[in-house]
Amino acid sequence: MTDSDAGRKPPPPPAYTPPPRVAASGLSIAALVVGIGAFLIGWIPFAGAVIGIVGIVLGSMAVRTARGRGFAITGLVLSVIATITSVLMVFVVLVWIPAIDRNNAGAFTSEPDDDPTTPLVDTSCYSFDLPARYGGDEYAVESWNEEASDCIAQVEVWGPDDGDVGVGVTVTPYTASTAEMVSEDGTLDDVADFVEQNGMARRGTLVADREPLDLAGAQAILSRYDRTSTAATDVMIVAAAPADYAPTGEPYALFIVRVSAHGEYGDELLATILDTWRWK
C-alpha cells in the first residue's frame, strides 16, 4: 500500500435496491372479491353456497401462484366460511323448520271448516268436529296431535270473555297391556275407576252414575264430574276400541276422551263430538 492509497477513503457501499414489487395476479384479486361477496350473502340458502364454491375454486387456484397469495388465502377462507354458513341455512330451511312444523301440527291453529265433511280432528283411528259456533272470528281454535297415525289428539278453544273461554278435548288411547295393568279384567268401569283415582279425582267428584254410551258403534261409558273450579262441564268417556288399531305395534284396547268447558255451551260441545265422532 502506498502513501497515496493510505490517504484515500474507501468507496461507499452500493445503495440498497429493494426487489421489484410483484403485483397480485388477477386470479388472486378475483378470489378475494368473490370471497368477500360470498361472506356477505353466506346466510342466504343455496346462493351463498354457490358463490362460496366459486370462491373456493378461484382461491385454490390462486394460492398456488406467488403473486397475491395473501389475497388468495383471504378469499379462500371467506369462501369456506360462506359455504358452511349457507349449507347450515339450507339445513335449517329444509330440515329443521319443517321438523318443528310437523311437531306443532299435529300442532296447528285453525278454525272449524264450514264443510261438515272435513272434521277438525282427523286421525288414523277416529275423527270428530266441534260446534259451528267456534268457527267465528272471535274464537281461536288449536288442534294438534303428535302424529295423526298415533291417534292421540288435543283441542283447545279460546274465545271472548263471555263465560265461553277455555274449552278442552283430549283423546288418549290405551294399549291392551296398559289396560290390563290398570284393570284386572279389563272392563271399562275398572279402567274408569283407575283413571279417576289417579287423575280425575283431583279435578272433581263423580256427580252421577256412569252412563252407558254407544260411541259410533263402540261400547263406552260416560262419567260426569263436579269441579270446584269454573268449569261447567267436565266429562270422561272410556270407549272400547271397535277395531284393531295398532299404529305403534301393540293394538289399542280402549280410548279415553276428556271434554271440559268453562262456559255454558258444554252440553252443545259434548253433543257435537258424540254426533260427529267416526271410527276409521
Image (cartoon, rainbow, N blue to C red):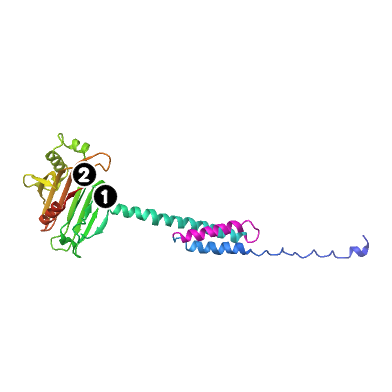
Identify the residue at image location x=62%, y=64%. 26
Judge from the rendering whether residue 201 lies leftward or rightward of residue 46; answer left or right. left
Between residues 141 and 230, which one lies in front from this camera angle? 141
Q: Quadrant of residue 143?
A: bottom left
Identify the residue at image location x=93%, y=62%. 2
Q: Is residue 157 magenta?
A: no
Vertical position of residue 238 compared to residue 66: above or below: above
Disc 1 marks which residue? 148
Q: Of the two numbered discs 2 and 1 on the same chain, state the one appearing first in sequence.
A: 1
Vertical position of residue 184 compared to residue 84: above or below: above
Between residues 4 and 255, which one lies in front from this camera angle? 255
Between residues 46 and 192, which one lies in front from this camera angle? 46
Q: Quadrant of residue 62?
A: bottom right
The span picked out in magenta is: 45-68
Residue type for callout 1: Ala
Residue 247, how many percent across, how many down?
Answer: 26, 43
Judge from the rendering whether residue 192 lies leftward or rightward of residue 142; answer left or right. left
Residue 157, how many percent across, how many down?
Answer: 19, 58
Identify the residue at image location x=89%, y=63%. 6
Label 1 environment density (alpha carbons within 10 Å; few <14, some 14–19, many ≥20): some
Q: Please identify the dominant SS of the magenta region.
A: helix
* Mark 2 vs mark 1, CA separation in Å: 12 Å
Disc 2 marks which residue? 173
Q: Quadrant of residue 177?
A: top left
Q: Is residue 47 magenta?
A: yes
Residue 268, how many percent across, how many down?
Answer: 11, 56
Vertical position of residue 185 compared to residue 276: above or below: above
* SS of the residue under disc 1: helix
Residue mark closest to the camera, 2 vs 1: 1
* SS of the residue under disc 2: strand
Residue type for callout 2: Pro
Q: Quadrant of the N terminus?
A: bottom right
